Image (tube, helix red, strand yellow):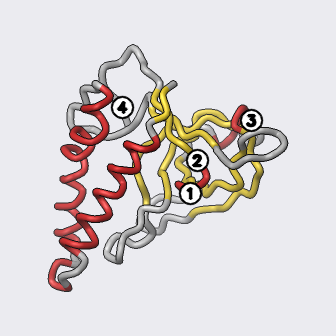
Amino acid sequence: MIDVTEIVHRYRLALRHIWNTCFWVDPDLRNYDSIDFHEKLKPPLFAAIVAGPLGIQTEGQIFGNGFQIVPKVASKEGPVLPSLLVKRSEPPYVTWKELVGPFKACELSLTLLDFFDWSPMSYMDLRYYRVRIETFVQNPDLTGQDALVDVVNADVFWTVTTQTSPII
């Protein structure tokens, strides 16, 4: 596993900067068309900033298999994740339930899917990783669910897989 947190955060900051300084600053661009345009920028930026340096063929996708979120908050039990927000319903009324930890790194496996912000037409922070729960010892029924992890509480690691591209 390779720690890729720094390049993933460069990508995150680029997305934030483009939205906040090129779209959000103009009230006429605070609309769903602009959100769609911003979403279309993600794959080429990901290819240039993340996938290219890692030698990954992305085929227009971002993150997915191989990108693991690993807790980094220090505790006497080792790295832990203080909490996790788990998706409990589907659009149009998505709800999230907070699960309070600590959750040990060895008891949880999370695949990075994207970044998340609460309000897509507001000033953007992208404070959360949107992840898929692969394994969760304390809550095995949540396997396969989407969840949110605060970016300050975890690092991103790339595991070279036999696949040539990430799949989300």
Residue positioned most to the right? 76
Residue at (22% x, 60% y) in the render: 38
- Marks 4/1: CA–CA distance: 22 Å
| Residues at marks 2 and 1, CA–CA distance in whole angstroms | 7 Å
Q: State the CA–CA distance, disc 3 to disc 2.
A: 18 Å
Pointer 3 or 1: first along the chain = 3
Comparing labels 3 and 1, the label whose residue is closer to the camera: 1
Residue matched to label 3: 137
Q: Horizontally, is 113 left or right of 56 in the view?
A: right
Q: Nearer the viewer, mark 3 or mark 2?
A: 2
2 and 4 marks in contact (CB < 8 Å): no
**What's under tag 2, amino acid-wise?**
Ala
Measuring 27% from the left and 38% from the top, which residue is drawn there? Answer: 61
**Where residue 118 sits: x, y (%)?**
45, 69
Give neighbour class at mark 3: few <14, some 14-19, many 20+ (Cα, 10 Å).
Answer: some
Mark 2 vs mark 4, foreground winner is 2
Q: Which residue is mark 2?
A: 154
Q: Which residue is mark 4?
A: 167
Quadrant assignment for the C terminus: top left
What is the quadrant of residue 12 in the picture?
bottom left
The answer to which of 37 and 151 lies nearer the viewer is: 151
**138 to the left or right of 86:** right
Residue 103: quadrant of the picture: top right
Instruction: Classify mark 1: helix, strand or loop.
Output: strand
Coordinates of residue 166 in the picture (x, y in percent): 35, 30
Q: Please state which amino acid type lies under the numbered disc 1.
A: Asp
Which label is found at residue 150? 1
Q: Amino acid at mark 3?
A: Val
